[in-house]
Amino acid sequence: MTRPPATVIVLNYNGTRWIERCLKSLSETRYENFKVILVDNASTDGSAEIALTKFPQVEVILNQDNEGFSEGNNIGIKKALADGAKYIVLLNPDTRVEPGWLQELVDIGETASDTGILGAVQLSYEGDGFNSWTVNALAKHLDELAEPAAARSWIAVDWVEGACFAVKSCVFDAIGFLDPIYTAFYEEIDFCRRAACRGYQTVVVPRSRIHHHRGGIWQSTARMSRRRNYLCDRSQFIYTLTEPRRSLVYNTGWYLVTLATKVKEIIKEKESDRAWDLLRMQFDLAGDLAVILGKWRKDRVQYDSVG
């Protein structure tokens, strides 16, 4: 039986520390009908050259600029769809996969018809314990996930992390691509929410396992870490304001609650830098208000078209 075609997209930006081990583990994947596309976001550290010279079987797309997570992946997604992929998997470069990871994802996708998005269980990069995402996001399932052979075939969840994000091609046809309104963070959570509004289920597959370091380039300097925190907070506000299943008035209320919570944290921890960042962020969001409202309206139309 021929397996459904799958494409794994690795979005890279200055990932020299990770990229060779990631691509090597992918080359050992036990799945006979998949390809790998590496999308490079204008790296300057030679990581794209590693892929080009050491992994000739990997298709490499070189972006002239850093397009960010959403747009960078969207470039790869569009190429994969044009090539006829039925499953498209976004995979972070700071990961290494276990040989059966992809087959487990696709097998569940093929048997669970309502499933549109699938994620693997994430283990620590060097060991076999759960990493921080699994511990936090899947806290109530940890006992079950610790015994994958005895676990359910799949577990319904609200979202899975973009580090390993398998999507059926029909979902992109139905709801579009990752939304570039998110410069970084919350893109996958938003995508899962939009998919849910169209009736697609997101699941985690206990017997699909990857190892993920988490943090990647964001941990390289204090400046990058501060930038990460800024973008994460900004994306959280956008996500709150654009919930399509709620009214704008309701969303605005939750935005104010989120803002008050962050102000309280800043006062408690006496974080002056974060205070300035939070203030600047409000002007940033105000400048993008028309775009944010446009997103809410667009997603609301998709939700209303089903419900």
Image (cartoon, grey):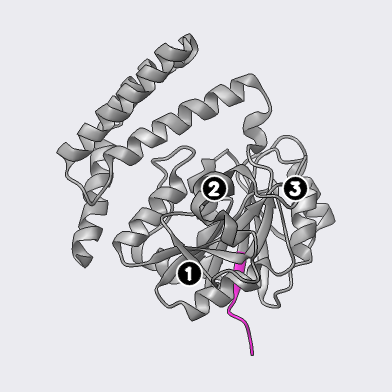
Residue 91, compared with residue 154, is above or below; it is: above
Q: Nearer the viewer, residue 77 or 144?
A: 144
For marks 1 and 3, the one nearer the N-term is: 3
Kind of residue at disc 2: Gly
Kind of residue at disc 1: Lys
Q: Quadrant of residue 175?
A: bottom left
- Residue 126 percent location from the top left of the image: 78, 47
Distance between the Cα atoms at labels 1 and 2?
19 Å
The crowd level at tag 1 (other Cα within 10 Å; few <14, some 14-19, many 20+) is many
- Residue 150 percent location from the top left of the image: 62, 71
Say which residue appears at 42% left-offset and 40% top-offset. 182
Quarter of the figure that contains the N terminus: bottom right
Q: Is residue 44 left or right of residue 186?
A: right
For marks 1 and 2, the one nearer the N-term is: 2
Residue receiving disc 3? 19
Query: What is the span of residues highlighted in magenta in the rendered image?
Result: 1-7
